[in-house]
Image (tube, rainbow, N blue to C red):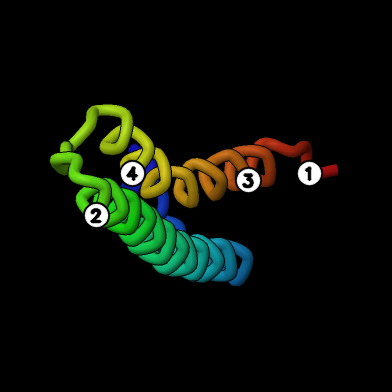
Amino acid sequence: MRTHAMALAFAAGKPQDSAELGRMIQEKLMATAEAGLAVQTEIARQATAAWWGMTLGRRPTLSAAGMKRLSGKAAAPYAKRVRGNSRRLTRSKG
């Protein structure tokens, strides 16, 4: 539904619609970069913790909590952008 509305707005060529589409694309690119950095940072943190554990004689494990934390880090930038878009697009224009 939303994609169809965006395609119609783009085809109509209204400047404000084009500006919004450009802003949405830019926000998604920034969210992707943020998510990538957050995931890499979390993987490095977990790898460091596993390494320290192995130096102390423990076996490395893959925990559900670690995977949940990793997926949360990946989704957080997108969730932040979606909330911001929703607030911005539902404000009364008056």
Say which of marks 4 and 2 sits in front. 2
Q: Amino acid at mark 2?
A: Thr
Say which of marks 1 and 3 sits in front. 3
Within 10 Å of the Cα at label 3, are there few (<14), some (14-19), or many (20+) other Cα atoms? few
As measured in the structure, the alpha-carbon distance from the residue carrying label 4 to the one carrying label 2 is 23 Å
Look at 78% across and 37% down and name the residue there.
92
Residue positioned most to the right: 94
Q: Is residue 66 above or below residue 80?
A: above
Residue with the mark numbered 2: 55
Look at 37% across and 37% down and name the residue there.
69
Q: Is residue 94 left or right of residue 41?
A: right
Residue with the mark numbered 3: 84
Contact? badges 4 and 1 (CB < 8 Å) = no
Look at 68% across and 46% down and name the residue there.
88
Q: Does dot 2 land on a helix, a strand or a loop?
A: helix
Residue 60 at x, y = what percent?
Answer: 16, 43
Q: Along the polypeptide, which appears first: circle 4 or circle 2?
A: 2
The numbered dot on residue 93 is 1
Within 10 Å of the Cα at label 2, are there few (<14), some (14-19), or many (20+) other Cα atoms? few
Q: Quarter of the image for the N terminus: give it.
A: top left
Residue with the mark numbered 4: 70
Q: Does dot 1 land on a helix, a strand or a loop?
A: loop
As measured in the structure, the alpha-carbon distance from the residue carrying label 2 to the one carrying label 3 is 44 Å
Q: Amino acid at mark 1?
A: Lys
Look at 58% across and 69% down and name the residue there.
19
